[in-house]
Image (cartoon, rainbow, N blue to C red):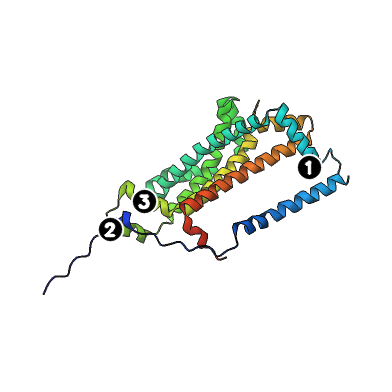
Amino acid sequence: MNAPTPLPRADVGTLVQPAVRASAGPSERLSFARRAIGPLIVVAAWAITTTAGWIDPSILPSPAGIVTGWQQLWHEQDLAQQVATSLTRALVGGAVGIVFGLFLGTIAGLSKLGEELFDALLQMLRTIPFLALVPLFIVWFGIGEAPKLLLIALATMFPMYLNTYAGVRNVDRKVIEAMRSFGLSGRRLITQVVLPLALPQIFTGLRFALGVSVLVLIAAEQINTSAGLGYLLNSAQMYQQVDVILICIAIYAVLGLSADLIVRSLEKLFMPWRASVAVR
């Protein structure tokens, strides 16, 4: 009796991903229109109440007054440069915090020793309000750019760490053992199996971290700034320029929304199957 022919060993790199079923939800244009309904209603109510004189312009300027203030800021205060300065602070500080959070979360999630070394310390630091660190950072690092960037980095590190840690820990142990049977181990196992399976949690942490970077930017730019949105906000508060304050708040909101849209785009690029998971 002839021995059965052994099956060829499967190569992990040649495994074919299942086809992603197209979403049966509404079109992108209809979805965008639905998202825009709420903001448009708010803007319409704002325009009607301020134009009709129901609200004092010194308390809430009209949309036309905001446009005029925007033009003045653009030409007289170099608004584009101020936004670029604040955006640079948020990106640099946020990038440092995200990298450290991703690294520490991966180490603590993969290794019990890493969890014992880092988790308790980071959980303790996470409970400290970041605003309470502002005076301490000023004493330690002065009033330059260093305390601003460190404050943003520290605040963004924690959500990235927590979500990465949870994502790595939630990877199915059976999948790890199956991939080891294919010959994967060490760094390849982490980069090709563990981190891809943890991507949903990692991207959730990235969304939180980028949002936090914008929130902390507002507090960080209160530290003796001579440029940036915080500088414009402090000057407007001193001279009670409500239109400038609203413009700065709107720019902060746009920065936060843009960061969230970027992460959503990255999710669609790296996890195209996720759009068909939720029940529509």
- Say which residue label 2 marks: 181
Disc 2 and disc 3 in contact, CB within 8 angstroms: no
33 to 251, vertically: above or below: below
Using the image as rendered, state which of residue 7 and residue 231 is in the foreground: 7
- Residue extending farthest right: 53
Using the image as rendered, state which of residue 126 and residue 96 is in the foreground: 96
Disc 1 and disc 2 in contact, CB within 8 angstroms: no
User: Could you tell me residue 232's position as x and y percent?
Assistant: 70, 31
- Say which residue label 1 marks: 63
Q: Residues within 10 Å of mark 2 (few under 14, many from 20)?
A: few
* Residue 123 seen in the figure: no
Using the image as rendered, state which of residue 172 and residue 22 is in the foreground: 22
- Say which residue label 3 marks: 192
User: Could you tell me residue 216's position as x and y percent?
Assistant: 61, 38
Choose the circle earlier in sequence order: 3 or 1: 1
Name the image quarter holding the C terminus.
Answer: bottom right
User: What whole-number distance in Å separates the C-alpha atoms at marks 3 and 1?
Assistant: 51 Å
Say what secondary structure mark 3 lies in: helix
Question: Could you tell me the amino acid type at mark 1?
Answer: Pro
* Residue 36 seen in the figure: yes
- Location of residue 87 (image quadrant): top right
User: What whole-number distance in Å separates the C-alpha atoms at marks 2 and 3?
Assistant: 14 Å
Choose the circle earlier in sequence order: 1 or 2: 1
Say what secondary structure mark 1 lies in: helix
Specify whether 160 is left or right of 114: right
